[in-house]
Image (cartoon, helix red, strand yellow):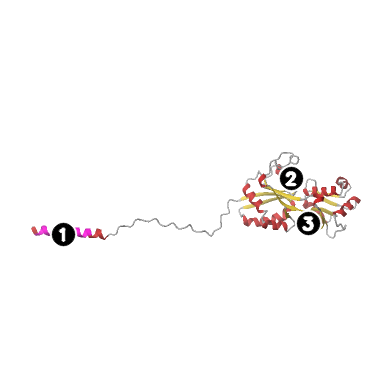
């Protein structure tokens, strides 16, 4: 019995030794460490284009070729923006805007039509107190030149505005000009006044016919239905018409094209971005290629 007790005591002592040895051999678990956060991977994908935006641009008819070309260029810069153009005489465009036609940007071929929509313009011009122009966006975008053009072959042999004035006075020419509500028409009126010619008398005598916009005047010249006509340099370029003379600033002043975002625009930021793009070297190179010039 005594021996059994000794054996049991030895076994219990051995068990204790084994337990202690096992505990002593275990390495304490290391404190968990926060894994280092790796830098966000740089994506090679292009930035998302953004929500689709449609901008409606009302522009003078003389800008059709250049803005159509710039439209393709801008699609690469802002692929989410689609441009919808309405080209016509500045007077017609002004009336459409006044009557509520949707429009984000207006580019006029004369200051008068823009002033008529601008509450900050002289009240003697903005006689109706219209308030469509976002004032901080308005700028003088381009300058054009008024030219005297003739049909192919120049049947009348017209070489200058001076000669045209003599032919008109003698009743020996048939000329086309823009209506009085068209900027190019008013520039032509100034030229007639410079030479002290009576427009109404000339029209009644059948020496003057009219076009509702500069494109119509250019078409009549190109078709040879008139002896000559007064249009912009840019239209002469696009229609491949012969220019025989350029009007001076003394004759009709500068031909400035103002542009502005309208207060009625539903996308004024996108409209301003496109307007800003029109002043970039890339866009200006297109304008200069057809005879426009940046305003000095």
Residue 253, percent across and down? Answer: 79, 49
For this view, does 73 lie left or right of residue 30?
Answer: right
Cα–Cα span, label 1 and label 2: 113 Å
Query: Dot 2 lies on which element?
Result: helix
Q: Residues within 10 Å of mark 3 (few under 14, many from 20)?
A: many
Whichever of callouts 3 and 1 sits on the residue coming sooner in the sequence is: 1
- Picture disc at residue 236: 3
Q: Which residue is mark 2?
A: 113
Q: Residue furthest left?
A: 1
Query: Dot 3 lies on which element?
Result: helix
Quadrant assignment, res 163:
bottom right
Residue 70, percent across and down? Answer: 68, 56
- Residue 102 in magenta? no
Query: Dot 1 lies on which element?
Result: helix
Q: Residue furthest top?
A: 128
What stretch of residues is rendered in magenta? Answer: 3-20
Q: Residue at x 82, y 53 (%)?
A: 229
Question: Could you say which is closer to the camera, residue 295 or residue 25?
Answer: 295
User: What type of secondary structure mainly makes up the magenta span?
Assistant: helix
**Circles 1, 2 touching at the beta carbon (< 8 Å):** no
């Amino acid at each position: 019995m005594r021996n059994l007790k000794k054996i049991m005591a030895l076994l219990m002592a051995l068990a204790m030794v084994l337990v202690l040895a096992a505990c002593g051999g275990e390495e304490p678990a290391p404190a968990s460490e926060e894994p280092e956060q790796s830098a966000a991977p740089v994506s090679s994908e292009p930035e998302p284009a953004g929500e689709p935006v449609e901008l409606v641009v009302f522009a003078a008819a003389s800008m059709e070729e250049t803005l159509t070309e710039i439209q393709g260029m801008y699609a690469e810069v802002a692929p989410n923006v689609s441009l919808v153009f309405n080209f016509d005489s500045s007077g017609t465009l002004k009336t459409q805007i006044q009557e509520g036609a949707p429009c984000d940007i207006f580019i006029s071929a004369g200051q008068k039509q823009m002033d008529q929509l601008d509450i900050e313009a002289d009240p003697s011009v903005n006689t109706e107190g219209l308030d469509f122009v976002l004032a901080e966006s308005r700028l003088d975008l381009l300058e054009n030149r008024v030219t005297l053009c003739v049909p192919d072959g120049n049947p009348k042999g017209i070489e200058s505005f001076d000669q045209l004035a003599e032919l008109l006075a003698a009743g020996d020419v048939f000329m086309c000009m823009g209506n009085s509500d068209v900027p190019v028409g008013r520039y032509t009126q100034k030229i007639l006044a410079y030479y002290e010619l009576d427009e109404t008398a000339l029209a009644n005598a059948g020496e003057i016919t009219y076009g509702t916009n500069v494109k119509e005047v250019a078409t009549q010249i190109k078709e040879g239905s008139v002896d000559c006509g007064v249009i912009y340099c840019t239209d002469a370029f696009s229609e491949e018409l012969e220019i025989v003379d350029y009007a001076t600033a003394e004759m009709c002043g500068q031909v400035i094209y103002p542009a502005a975002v309208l207060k009625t625009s539903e996308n004024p930021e996108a409209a301003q971005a496109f307007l800003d793009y029109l002043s970039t070297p890339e866009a200006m190179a297109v304008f200069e290629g057809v005879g426009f010039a940046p305003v000095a």
